[in-house]
């Protein structure tokens, strides 16, 4: 089983910050870490700092989208123009698929 994890900070203004920098972590009102299975099941949720359930739900939904949901029609393309991962599960599938393909080419050439 594979899993993906992401951290989401909630700024003092209430905005969500994905994969926050150390500075953003220090300035956040709360920080949340979520891990999801390859089937999208929540495996871990850790939180620090004061937050409302509505804010936690927003952070959870954002993390689940980052980890599990492929943008419509983009399962093949796991990275956007800036090189940032659109979806961690799609990125992992693409990376593992590429490794398997390279391995098969090496064996076929032998």
Image (cartoon, rainbow, N blue to C red):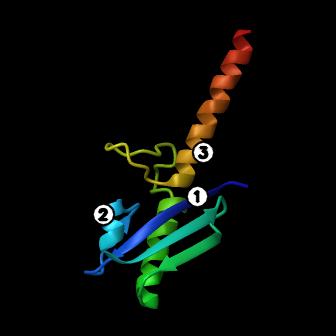
- Name the image quarter holding residue 42: bottom right
Position of 24 relative to 100 (above/below) = below
Q: Distance between the residues labelled 2 and 3?
A: 31 Å
Question: Mark 2 or mark 3: which comes first in sequence?
Answer: 2
**Residue ID at (70%, 10%):** 109
Q: Is residue 95 left or right of residue 58?
A: right
- How far is the residue under mark 1 from the one under mark 2? 23 Å
- Ranked by sequence position, the earlier of labels 3 and 1 is 1
Residue receiving disc 1: 4
Nearest the camera: 25 or 84? 25
Q: Is residue 103 left or right of residue 59?
A: right
Determine the CA span between mark 3 and mark 1.
12 Å
Assess disc 1: are there few (<14), some (14-19) or many (≥20) residues with their C-alpha within 10 Å of its C-alpha.
many
What percent of the width, then of the height, locates residue 61? Answer: 47, 74
Q: Check disc 1 and report its element: helix, strand or loop.
A: strand
Q: Is mark 3 on a helix, strand or loop?
A: helix
Q: Name the residue under label 3.
A: 93
Which numbered disc, 1 or 2, marks the residue that appears first in the sequence? 1
**Residue bearing the label numbered 2:** 23
Residue 70: x %, y % from top left? 50, 56
Q: How crowded is mark 2: few (under 14 residues within 10 Å), some or many (20 or more)?
A: few
Q: Quadrant of the N terminus?
A: bottom right
Q: State the image quarter where residue 97 is shown.
A: top right
In the image, residue 33 sits, relative to residue 29, either above or below, namely: above
**Which residue occupies the extreme left position in the image?**
13
Q: Viewer-nearest of labels 1 and 2?
A: 2
């Amino acid at each position: 089983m594979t899993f993906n994890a992401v951290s989401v900070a909630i700024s003092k203004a209430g905005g969500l910050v994905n994969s926050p920098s150390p500075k953003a972590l220090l300035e956040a009102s709360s920080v949340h870490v979520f891990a999801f299975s390859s089937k999208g099941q929540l495996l871990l949720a850790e939180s620090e700092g004061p937050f409302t359930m509505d804010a936690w739900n927003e952070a959870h939904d954002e993390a689940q989208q980052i980890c599990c949901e492929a943008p419509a029609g983009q399962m093949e393309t796991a990275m956007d123009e800036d090189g940032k991962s659109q979806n961690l599960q799609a990125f992992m599938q693409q990376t593992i698929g590429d490794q398997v393909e390279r391995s098969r080419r090496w064996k076929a050439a032998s």
